[in-house]
Image (cartoon, rainbow, N blue to C red):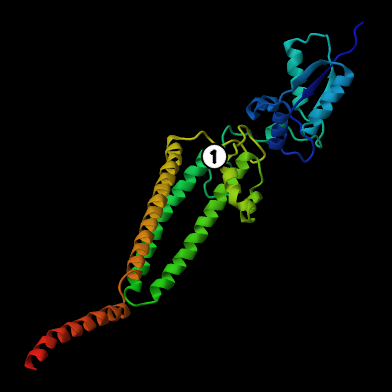
Amino acid sequence: MSDTRYKIVFDGALQPGVDITTAKLNLADLFKSEVAAIERLFNGSVVAIKRDLSHSDAQTYLQALNKTGINARIESETPIELNLSDVHEHTAAVMEPSSPYAPPRANVGESLPAFATLKPFSVEGRIGRLRYLAWSMVLTLVTLPIIGIFALIALGLVGADSTSGLIIGGIFAVFLFLALLIASIMFSVQRLHDIGWSGWLWLLTLVPFVGSFFPFVVMIVPGNSVANRYGPPPPPNSTAVKVLCSLWIVFIALFFVGGILGGISAIQQEYESNLESSYESGSVTTDEIDVEVEPAANSADDAAEAAQAPVDSAKE
C-alpha cells in the first residue's frame, strides 16, 4: 500500500489581524508573481495550492504560506472519485461558517485594481519617473508667468514712489514659495512610493551634501512594476506625459546656451575694461607736459639771443 499523500488547501480565510491586501501582496512576493494572478485564490471557493506532498513537505509549505497571512491547511489526498453532487455539497459545507468566531472570508475584501488612481496633490499613491518629471515641468510652466505678473505689479507700485509694492510682492512671493514647496514634496513622496521607499526619505534633501544628489537618485531609480505596500503601479504614461518630460531637454539646453552666452559677454566686458584701464595708465600726465615744455622754452630764448647778437655788434 502506498504512503498517504497530502495537499494544501485554501478557502480565503486570513490570519487574525491581517489585511487582505497585505496578504495578496505577500503571496505575490512568495510566488514571484503579479497580484492579478493571486486574485483567483480569493474567489471564495476551496483551492488546492499544492498537491501530492509528503507530510514533511506539506508542513514546510504550510509554514511558508501562513507567514504571508493566509490561513491554509493540510488535507490528505483521497483516491475516491467524487461525483458532481458531492462536489456541490462539499462546497456548500465549506462556504457555510461552522462557528460565529470563524475568521473572515475573502468576500469581505475588495479586489486590488490593476493601476492606481492618480492623485497629484496628495502624499498617497505612486508615480513613475517620466510622470514625476512631467508634473514638475507643469509646475515650472505655471510658476514662471505668475512670477512675471507679481514682478510687474511690484514694479508698477514701486514706480509710484511707494513701499507698498515691495510689501505686496514679498507677501505674494512667500505664499508662492510655500505652495511650490508643498506641491514638490507631494510629487517626491509619490515617486518614493513607486520605488517602494518611505516618503519620509524626502527629508534627506535637507541634509548637507546628501541633499545635493538625492533628488537625482529619485529621478533615476526605477519603480516597482507590480503592486507594493503603497498600492498598485501607476497607469502607463500618456503622450502628454512624454511631451512634457521631453521639454526638460529643451529647458536644460536653453539654460546651458544662456550660461555660455553670459560667460562670453562677461569675458568681453572684462577685456574691454582692462583695455581702457591700460590706455589710461599709458597717457601723458600734466607733470610730464611741464617737463617737456621747459626745455623747449630755453631753446627759444637761446635762439633769440643768438639773433640779437649780430645786431648789437653792428651798432657798435
Outermost residue toward the top in this view: 1
- Residue at (38% x, 61% y) in the render: 270
- Residue at (39% x, 76% y) in the render: 163
Residue density around tag 1, few if under 14, some if 14–19, many if 20 or more, within 10 Å? some
Percent x, y of residue 262: 39, 54
Outermost residue toward the front in this view: 316
Q: Quadrant of residue 47?
A: top right
Quick check: 291 above or below 220? below
Q: Quadrant of residue 20?
A: top right
Find disc 1 in the rendering and name its residue. Answer: 129
Q: Quadrant of residue 152?
A: bottom left
Relative to residue 150, is residue 1 drawn left or right? right
Relative to residue 213, is residue 279 drawn left or right? left
The N terminus lies in quadrant: top right
Give SS at disc 1: helix
Percent x, y of residue 255: 42, 49
Percent x, y of residue 227: 63, 34
